[in-house]
Image: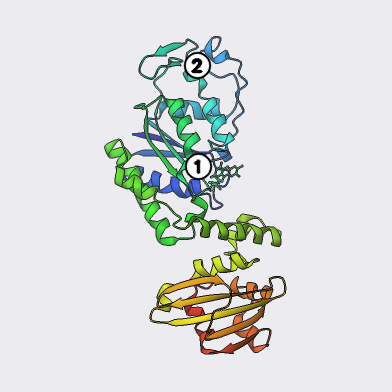
Amino acid sequence: MNVLAINSSARVGKGSKTEIMLEPLVQGMRDAGALVEVVNLVDRNIKTCIGCFTCMTKTPGVCILKDDMTRELFPKWLEADIVVYATPLFYHTVNATMKTFLERTFPVALPFLEFHEEDGRWHHPLRHKAPKSVFLSVCGFPASSAFDALRHYVNYLFGAGSQNVLAEIYRDGAEGMLYEKKLLDEITSATRDAGRQLIEEGAIRPETMETIEQPVVSDFALSTEIANCAWRTCIADGITLQEFQDQGMSPRPDTLDSYLAIMRMGFNPKGAVGKKAVLQFNFTGSVEDTCQLVIDDGSIKAIPGAPEKPDLTIMTPFDLWADIVAGRADGQQMFMERKYNVEGDPELLIQFGQFFNRPE
Ligand SMILES: Cc1cc2nc3c(=O)[nH]c(=O)nc-3n(C[C@H](O)[C@H](O)[C@H](O)COP(=O)(O)O)c2cc1C
């Protein structure tokens, strides 16, 4: 079985989520004995269709443009048994690179118009048998509805309920999925199973699909607060998202809400089993406010306002604490240098590292 996998992400080799999903899919297909060629469109020169219709009449089935599509990719596309279209979701649909590729498969069609009773739509008949398709897309928004327009498009492109589409794999929240290693492993391992199943069984089993497309976010409000804070950190530092990710940086809190969200997200329940602590923070400087972290046997409440009886009160400039939380300053060192003060049980300060995952 010949498979051609077309990847239209421009970020191949730079943490591309399309690539992170395509790799195990292809691996699974190879495990099952398929011959798979992966083509990264970022390395190819494909001109946009100029709409001349020459391929319909004067040069039947052959495009007049001279580039990698005419010379190499369209013949390979025609010969493939299955084509995997892997694309990041841009503006609710395939990205422009994938769209250009798809449009350049136009020479497969005849110019005539045919009405198909089964889907109630007009179609061009094909001059050659088209390969079966697998659609794979990833997107940033953590909601499967982000793919609604693409689903509709794929359905239109290949015909309603068409036997031609073997599978559609849509992974939302793909940027966020990287931060949860266990989840990422589960998703990529199921994607490899999916590749195997596509070759051996011609479809992806529903339970495999469920694992691949499982929600990556359990608390939408919390995740968006942190994502927005990460973006503000990039803007404040004048760096790209890629640089933020490559350097393993953490969002630096800049508001009370973002601080509370980061503490909730970074809480390590295992480190707080059997522990009880009420921590009060009195912030000064860029954020003048008070908040509390209530740790109770593996659970945390991070809320604004002062508690009745804190076990420990930390009085600190907000910016200094933000640097400590983001791993840019050492909490112990800052304490020794009296950059912030505490009242109450200082032992809790030492335990802080157990209660919260440190930025890597
Ligand atoms: C121009 C542009 C448009 C995008 N449009 C959407 C969108 O409509 N919906 C969405 O959820 N994510 C959108 N995203 C986010 C990408 O789908 C997401 O970052 C994806 O992981 C990129 O894949 P890659 O890492 O393979 O490049 C967009 C990103 C860019 C750069």
Q: Which of these two is toward me, 26 or 228?
A: 228
Dot 2 falls on a residue whose secondary structure is: loop
- Give coordinates of residue 82: x percent, y percent: 38, 32
Report crowding for label 2: few under 14, some 14 to 19, many 20 or more residues within 10 A (C-alpha).
Answer: some
Tag 1 residue: 146
Q: Which of these two is toward me, 349 or 155?
A: 349
Tag 2 residue: 61
Decide if ligand 1 comes within 8 Å of the CB at mark 1.
yes
Q: In percent of the image, x 43 and y 11: which residue is there?
A: 114
| Circle nearer the N terminus (1, 2) | 2
Quarter placement of the N terminus: top left
What amino acid type is highlighted by mark number 1? Ala
Mark number displayed over residue 16: none
What amino acid type is highlighted by mark number 2? Gly
| Measured Cα–Cα span from mark 1 to mark 2 | 35 Å
Q: Which of these two is toward me, 96 or 150?
A: 150
Dot 1 falls on a residue whose secondary structure is: helix
